[in-house]
Image (spheres, rainbow, N blue to C red):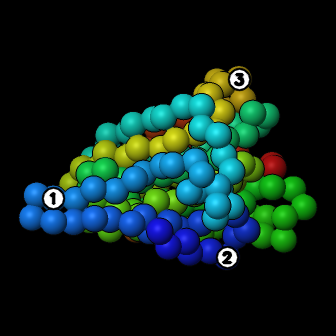
Amino acid sequence: MKINKTGIEGVLLIEPDVYEDPRGFFMETWRHEKYSSVGINATFAQDNLSYSEKGVLRGLHLQIPNAQAKLVQALVGEIFDVAVDLRRGSPTFGQWISAKLSADNKHQFFIPEGCAHGFCVTSPTALVSYKCSKPYRPESEKALLWNDPDIGIKWPVENPLVSEKDSVGLLLKDF
């Protein structure tokens, strides 16, 4: 397993060990002792599965309180995955980082508590799996506006399809 640090503390791009042969491949997507040995000490409480078509943008989501760490992976297709640091006092507060996750590259993106998360689909369809360290709590859910100019995320789609909730997210200055 290869761990790639990013420009935001705690946000990691993970390249799991993949064992391929003529039958296909095998890989571990989570083993607590292996991931904790590289600093990922999350205990996951919930798994989510999302299906979307090209141009769909989901996010940027987080929970306050009950912040969630997330481990994200594309099982089918490809996504442009984004984390935005919203941790008060962090030297990278308001900064974003992205990763291309796909069924082909099999990479995972670890997003620590206190970061907003979102993705857009860049392939015809995508099936995305993500583990969350705390259960979903509707009363804690917040959305950061996906196109906030103060953040300046360079999304790879011009007119994404977003939910009504995501189209009226909070601005960075509101955090």
Q: Residue at x 40, y 53 (%)?
A: 28
Count of residue discs: 3
Q: Spatial distance from mark 2 to mark 1, Cα to Cα?
A: 34 Å
Estimate the spatial distance between the alpha carbons at disc 1 and disc 3, rounded to whole Å: 43 Å
Residue 25: x and y, percent? 22, 59
Looking at this rendering, what residue extends furthest in the right direction?
Answer: 89
Is residue 159 or residue 101 the one in the foreground? Answer: 101
Label 2 vs 1, first from the N-terminus: 2
What's the residue at 42%, 64% (across, down)? 16
Give the amino acid type for the residue marked by disc 3 in the picture.
Answer: Glu
Chain-order first, disc 2 or disc 3? 2
- Residue 128 in the image: state x and y as whole percent: 37, 46
Look at 27% across and 56% down and name the residue there: 26
| 84 lies left or right of 15 | right
Secondary structure at badge 2 equals loop
Three-letter code for the amino acid on which mark 1 is drawn? Gly
> Which one is in front, 157 or 112?
112
Residue for badge 1:
24
Among the 4 quarters of the image, the one containing residue 147: bottom right
Mark nearer the N terminus (1 vs 3): 1
Q: Amino acid at mark 2?
A: Gly
Q: Is residue 40 above or below residue 3?
A: above
Front: mark 2 or 1:
1
Q: Does the rendering let one see residue 151?
A: no
**In this figure, which residue is indicated by the disc labeled 3?**
139
Whole-Å distance between the Cαs marked 2 and 3? Answer: 31 Å
Q: Which residue is mark 2?
A: 7
Label 1 secondary element: strand
Q: Classify mark 3: helix, strand or loop.
A: helix
User: x and y percent of residue 50 in the render?
Assistant: 38, 39
In this rendering, would 149 be left or right of 98? right
Residue at the spot 59% in from the left edge and 66% down from the top edge: 12
